[in-house]
Image (cartoon, grey):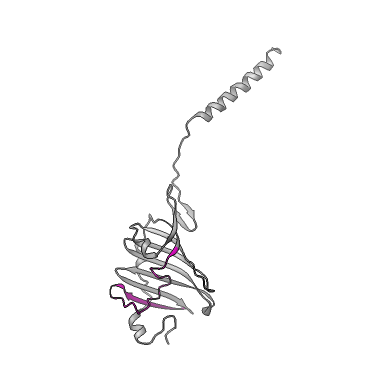
Amino acid sequence: MKKFAPYLVLAIIIGLGVLVWQRGEKPAVVVQNTEQVQIEGVTTPPGKKPESGMATLAALSQKGESLECQVVLERSDAEGNIEGTYFTHQGSMRGDFMVPSPEFGGKLMSSMIVDANMLFVWTTIDNQVIGFKSDLTNLDTTVSTKEPIPLDEPVRYTCTVWDSVDGSVFIPPAQVTFTDTRTAIQGGIEYGILPD
């Protein structure tokens, strides 16, 4: 038995090596992951990579997809970039952006909704919410609509398909009084200045 012991050990080692080698040759079993993956604040469905690039908010809306995006308007001035989240679904748009505002001590949250050819913009300044609305079908191009990021301004974006569309994000907040932009400017109210 002592003569065969080294051969037995060698046979066991070779046998284990063959088993390991055969396991490596088997086709891999594919398991689909059903979890949502979090990438830069955007939920990405399994197997769907985020899309990145440069485009205008209007162009992103015209893609015909329901999208959730992180966007950055890069500015060369001293105030810095405007960053935020942007949603689009069936022609409606919603954006919530952090806008540099040194005169108010840092940054302000400014939001906008475009729905049924109406633009709604609102900002909280010194605990007061200021809201303006503009009819985009009868827009006077001499009147600035003052959205946080102009719809035709190129932004850097990272978007993914928005699977769980929540249509309520496209409804302007009921607690905000929206003043018609043209009426306000004709009446002498300067945008960004708090009314008395």
Decide which of 153, 57 is in the foreground and name it.
153
Q: Would residue 180 be visible to someone looking at this image?
A: no
Q: Position of residue 140 (x, y in %)?
A: 31, 78
Can you give x and y, in whole percent of width and height, for residue 165 in the image? Answer: 36, 58
Residue 170 quadrant? bottom left
Against 80, residue 27 (above or below) is above
Residue 136: image quadrant is bottom left
Residue 89 x, y percent position in the rendering: 34, 60
The residue closer to the viewer here, 70 or 1, is 70
Residue 7, can we see it? Answer: yes
195 w.r.t. 153: above or below: below
Per the rendered image, the range of residues in magenta is 127-155
**Which residue reaches farthest left?**
138
Quadrant in which residue 111 is drawn: bottom left
Identify which residue is drawn at 43% across, 68% down: 96
Question: The N terminus lies in which quarter of the figure?
Answer: top right
* Extreme residue in the right direction: 2
